[in-house]
Image: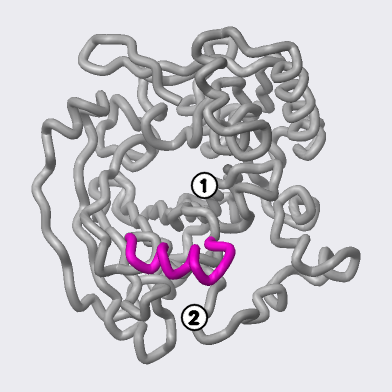
């Protein structure tokens, strides 16, 4: 996850599709980009007519099962007039988003999350995806807001009352796809400072483009992200991590993966411009289930919540990397009971 500031302002845009999860050292469950410009938000939301909204009630049993007391569901909004512009999902249905309005002193601040979901890689894969919420707004249901999207001041002290937008991902190509074109020419929008030095498609990956980012940014990720580990080292390898009985060969693979990941990170010499919080827990994403006091995964008694909040509001600048060179099992406290969760 990249977190970037634009002109040190107070709005965050989280983009999950700058890179492919399978081919990059970085996992971009969120790329947070800051700007105070309300026009930016209107460009994304206000210019599209709000036509249709789905409704749902909060499922209390779901919240209890996940151990997330402060979670809540937000209705789906269909962007119907996107059809005339060709901005559609894999099945041709219109796109959708979820909007929860801010309040109090956060009413003019925005968090925008562009959903994750990897890529579909061939016709069969994309066809199958078109029958799910990753390829069709027809299958999208209300989305659960928690973590950095929580309204709880105690759980999310710095962003609890901001406007929050979750943009659904349904084109199968990192928000660059086109159901009528095999190659929509997405590389044309990438920085020439990168594309002039290497194959343009490589500039879609953050390890190749980070040096071209002019604004400050903050990287949050596990060195042993469960999605990365499963797809690079081996599926179901989380079993040995939780049991703490991985083989010497597997441990060597973990160490190599960590080394390559850390070498791709920005250097730690200016945390104001390039902050970081890199833990060693075998899990995927830090902005949701683990963005609360109970389930936070600390490094030297520091958590993502406080380190990122301090960095974003210029209270303190940090570049934190956990020393463990092997993955740690991760757990959630659910209804007072400690349970394994990868």
Give the mark nearest the N terminus, 2 or 1: 1
Q: Is residue 298 visible?
A: no
- Residue at disc 1, secondary structure: loop
Give the camera-side residue of 300 and 215: 300
Which residue is at 48% across, 67% downward? 126
Residue picked out by circle 2: 179
Which of the labelled discs sits on residue 30, or is there none?
Answer: 1
- The residue segment tinted magenta is 120-132
- Answer whether residue 93 is magenta in the image: no
Camera-nearest residue between 85 and 213: 85
User: What residue lies at 70% left-to-right and 19% top-to-bottom?
Assistant: 250
Residue 341: image quadrant is top left
Q: Please state the horizontal and vertical placement of residue 194, each as a whole percent of the image.
A: 82, 64
Q: Is residue 36 or residue 22 the one in the foreground?
A: 22
Residue 81 appears in view: yes
Residue 271 image position (x, y, % from top left) = 71, 33
- Residue 219, percent from left and from top: 63, 38
The quarter of the picture where residue 264 lies is top right
Tell me the tag on residue 40: none
Q: Secondary structure at mark 2?
A: loop
């Amino acid at each position: 996850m990249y977190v970037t500031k634009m002109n040190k302002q107070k709005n965050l845009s989280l983009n999950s599709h700058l890179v492919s999860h399978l081919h990059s050292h970085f996992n971009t469950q969120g790329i947070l980009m800051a700007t105070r410009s309300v026009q930016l938000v209107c460009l994304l939301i206000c210019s599209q007519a709000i036509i249709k909204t789905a409704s749902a009630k909060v499922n209390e049993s779901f919240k209890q099962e996940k151990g997330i007391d402060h979670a809540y569901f937000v209705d789906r909004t269909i962007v119907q007039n996107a059809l005339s512009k060709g901005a559609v999902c894999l099945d041709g249905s219109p796109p959708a988003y979820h909007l929860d309005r801010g309040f109090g002193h956060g009413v003019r601040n925005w968090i925008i999350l562009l959903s994750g979901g990897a890529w579909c890689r061939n016709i069969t894969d994309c066809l199958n995806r078109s029958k799910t919420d990753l390829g069709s707004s027809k299958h999208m249901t209300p989305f659960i807001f928690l973590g950095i999207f929580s309204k709880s001041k105690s759980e999310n002290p710095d962003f609890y009352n901001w406007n929050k937008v979750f943009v659904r991902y349904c084109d199968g190509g990192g928000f660059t796809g086109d159901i009528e074109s095999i190659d929509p020419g997405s590389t044309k929008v990438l920085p020439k400072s990168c594309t002039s030095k290497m194959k343009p498609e490589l500039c879609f990956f953050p390890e190749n483009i980070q040096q071209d980012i002019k604004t400050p940014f903050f990287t949050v990720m596990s060195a042993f992200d469960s999605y990365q580990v499963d797809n690079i080292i081996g599926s179901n390898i989380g079993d040995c991590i939780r049991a703490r009985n991985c083989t010497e060969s597997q441990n060597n693979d973990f160490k190599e993966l960590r080394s390559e990941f850390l070498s791709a990170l920005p250097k730690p010499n200016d945390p104001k411009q390039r902050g970081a919080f890199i833990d060693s827990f075998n899990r995927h994403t830090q902005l949701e289930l683990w963005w609360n006091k109970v389930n936070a995964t600390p490094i030297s008694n520091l958590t993502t919540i406080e380190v990122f909040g301090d960095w974003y509001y210029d209270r303190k600048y940090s570049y934190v990397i956990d020393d463990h060179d092997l993955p740690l099992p991760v757990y959630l406290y659910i209804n007072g009971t400690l349970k394994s969760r990868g």
